[in-house]
């Protein structure tokens, strides 16, 4: 399986993984007026030489003002980062500059979910951790500043069935300014394009929403696809007062299902064409 640029899913994930590490660990602290801008090519090339095969944090933000702890890294994730370094190191300056160049033109609107199927959200406060039930996310609404083509994939395709990029993905045209709904896998394949590199705008931040895949089983050959999730960039490093912490993406979900007159859960009419099969299978 390969994308239009002849890369495999693993190669696209490798680029995304390195971009995510770069963006989430090297971004300046908002509000630091003395932060010096650094060309992104320099940031990426500095990371190519980092030993990220071990579990120690090798990243500092570009201002050297603060450090960010790195979570324990699996060997599968380390391999993705290694591949990402190899691929980006072979890119031209123009290709590198294209990475994430249009993330600010693609905007998060809503997270879509099923209230008939519950998942767990973790809340942490001064009393510790607690767990609440929330609707299970199944889709996402976006809006683009420019005309684009977006993937169209059968919603019943998943990590167990696999997705053949040549046979299972078609494309539909979206006009600028038009809200459009995507399944999680459709959104994953859209955001894996170089021009988005795993990010889109949310909360006023051009890279405020990022793709976050669970890829270990896929890399081990235990699943046919990684499992996509989406999250907001944390803003708890903002220095100036008067800015609220961004709530997690699951804190506000638009439910796309409801009970009919017979008490059966069904997909609302506005979403039934794309998401209807979820409650019919």
Image: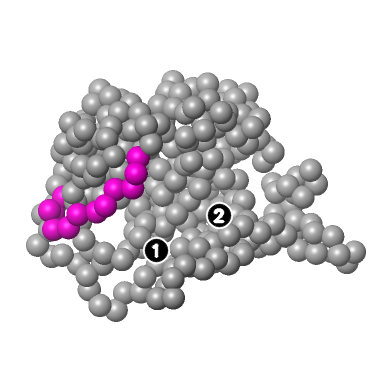
**Range covered by the magenta-colored residues:** 62-73
Q: Nearer the viewer, residue 52 or 202?
A: 52
Q: Residue furthest right?
A: 262
At numbered mark 1, what does the secondary structure look like: helix, strand or loop?
loop
At numbered mark 2, what does the secondary structure look like: helix, strand or loop?
strand
In the rendering, which numbered label is found on residue 141? Answer: 2
Mark 1: few/some/many CA within 10 Å (<14, 14-19, 20+): some
**Is 95 left, or right, of 74 in this rendering?**
left
Q: Residue furthest front?
A: 128
**Is 234 left, or right, of 143 in this rendering?**
left
Q: Position of residue 251 (x, y in %)?
A: 52, 66
In the rendering, which numbered label is found on residue 203? Answer: 1
Q: How many marks?
A: 2
Say which residue appears at 44% left-offset and 20% top-offset: 6
Which quadrant, please, contains the C terminus? Answer: top right
Q: CA distance from mark 2 to mark 1?
A: 14 Å
Q: Nearer the viewer, residue 173 or 59?
A: 59
Q: Where 19 sits versus 111, above or below?
A: above
Identify the main secondary structure in magenta: loop
Within the image, what quadrant is residue 246 found in? bottom left
Q: Where 193 sits versus 66, above or below?
A: above
Mark 2: few/some/many CA within 10 Å (<14, 14-19, 20+): some
Query: Does residue 3 show up?
Result: no
Say which residue appears at 22% left-offset and 73% top-offset: 240
Q: Position of residue 264 (x, y in %)?
A: 84, 60
Say which residue appears at 9% left-offset and 62% top-offset: 34
Q: Earlier in the sequence, mark 2 or mark 1?
A: 2
CB-based contact (under 8 Å), mark 2 and mark 1: no
Q: Position of residue 63 (x, y in %)?
A: 13, 54
Say which residue appears at 20% left-offset and 42% top-offset: 58
Q: Nearer the viewer, residue 272 or 241?
A: 241
Q: Where 186 sits versus 79, above or below?
A: below
């Amino acid at each position: 399986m390969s994308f239009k640029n002849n890369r495999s899913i693993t190669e696209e994930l490798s680029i995304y993984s390195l971009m995510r590490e770069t963006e989430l660990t090297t971004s300046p602290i908002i509000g630091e007026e003395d932060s010096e801008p650094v060309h992104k090519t320099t940031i990426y090339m500095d990371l190519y030489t980092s030993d990220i095969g071990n579990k120690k944090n090798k990243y500092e933000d570009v201002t050297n003002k603060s450090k960010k702890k790195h979570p324990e890294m699996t060997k599968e994730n380390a391999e993705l980062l290694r591949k990402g370094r190899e691929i980006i190191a072979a890119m031209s300056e123009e290709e590198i500059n294209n990475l994430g160049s249009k993330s600010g033109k693609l905007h998060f609107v809503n997270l879509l979910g099923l209230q008939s199927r519950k998942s767990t959200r973790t809340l942490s406060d001064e009393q510790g951790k607690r767990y609440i039930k929330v609707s299970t996310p199944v889709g996402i609404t976006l809006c683009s500043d420019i005309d684009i083509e977006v993937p169209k994939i059968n919603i019943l395709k998943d990590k167990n069935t696999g997705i053949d990029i040549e046979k299972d993905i078609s494309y539909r045209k979206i006009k600028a300014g038009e809200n459009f709904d995507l399944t999680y896998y459709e959104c994953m394949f859209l955001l894996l394009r170089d021009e988005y590199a795993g990010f889109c705008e949310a909360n006023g931040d051009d890279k405020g929403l990022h793709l976050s895949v669970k890829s270990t089983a896929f890399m081990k050959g235990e699943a046919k696809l990684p499992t996509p999730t989406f999250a907001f960039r944390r803003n708890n490093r903002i220095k100036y007062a008067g800015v609220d912490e961004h709530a997690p993406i699951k804190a506000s979900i638009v439910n796309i299902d409801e009970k009919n007159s017979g008490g059966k859960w069904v997909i609302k009419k506005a979403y039934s064409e794309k998401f209807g099969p979820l409650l019919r299978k």
